[in-house]
Amino acid sequence: MPRKILKAVLNALLAVAIALAVLVLAEYFDIHLFREAGGGLAAAAQRQPPPQNVGQSDELLRSLDLTGEIASTKGRPLRMRKITIQPGGALARHTHADRPAVTYMLQGEMTYYVEGNPPVVVRAGESTAEGRGTTHWAENTGKVPAVWLGIDIPAN
């Protein structure tokens, strides 16, 4: 099998494995992956994404260099971070075109504004999966810090 095809197959298998793991865990723990935010599309149209992150801190929990693990991810780590956004804080608009991620909300709630979709509130015990087609921003619409685990494969 040519090397380019093998790399593409490995990338596809990795994406499928991550998505499947999220779905299996969500089913096992009876986690609802998405819930619509109040206000519908009209409210989302009035909200503007912040120009930069506000009230965010993150702590790198684990990192794994995938250079020797999967040839197509040479130089890229698999990382897990604990991310905290204070009430009223926000994540700036960004894309996951080259950084697949899965998250699990530990505390609080975040409202996600994904392009082309209605807003979604993710609460403690719920999760998200963000792939190549995800462009979004988010804000902590709750009264306590939002804390979640973010696992991704950044490009460095």
Image: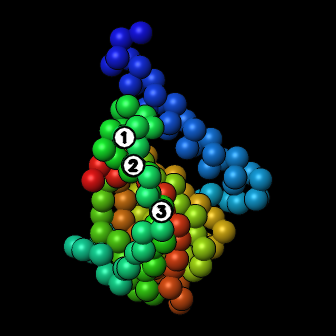
- Labels 2 & 1 near each other (Cβ < 8 A): yes
Q: Badge 1, how many Cα within 10 Å: few under 14, some, many 20+?
A: few
Q: Residue 67 carries which label?
A: 1
Q: Badge 2, how many Cα within 10 Å: few under 14, some, many 20+?
A: some
Where is residue 11? Give x, y as percent: 43, 32
Q: Residue 104 carries which label?
A: none
User: Disc 2 to disc 3, how far (Cα)?
Assistant: 10 Å
- Labels 2 & 3 near each other (Cβ < 8 A): no
Mark positioned earlier in the residue sequence (3 or 1): 3
User: Disc 2 to disc 1, how far (Cα)?
Assistant: 6 Å
Tell me the residue at 55%/35% (across/down). Answer: 16
Callout 3 secondary element: strand
Can see residue 36? no
In this view, 65 is above or below 86: above
Instruction: Kindly identify which residue carries mark 2.
Output: 65
**The N terminus lies in quadrant:** top left
Callout 1 secondary element: loop
Q: Quadrant of residue 32?
A: bottom right
Tell me the amino acid under the disc marked 1: Thr
Tell me the residue at 47%/62% (across/down). Answer: 62
In this view, 102 is above or below 5: below
Please identify the residue farthest to the front as the structure is shown.
68
Tell me the residue at 54%/88% (across/down). Answer: 144
Tell me the amino acid under the disc marked 3: Arg
Q: Residue 62 carries which label?
A: 3
Q: Quadrant of residue 26?
A: bottom right
Tell me the amino acid under the disc marked 2: Asp
Can see residue 73? yes
In this view, 21 is above or below 84: above
Please count the marks in the image: 3
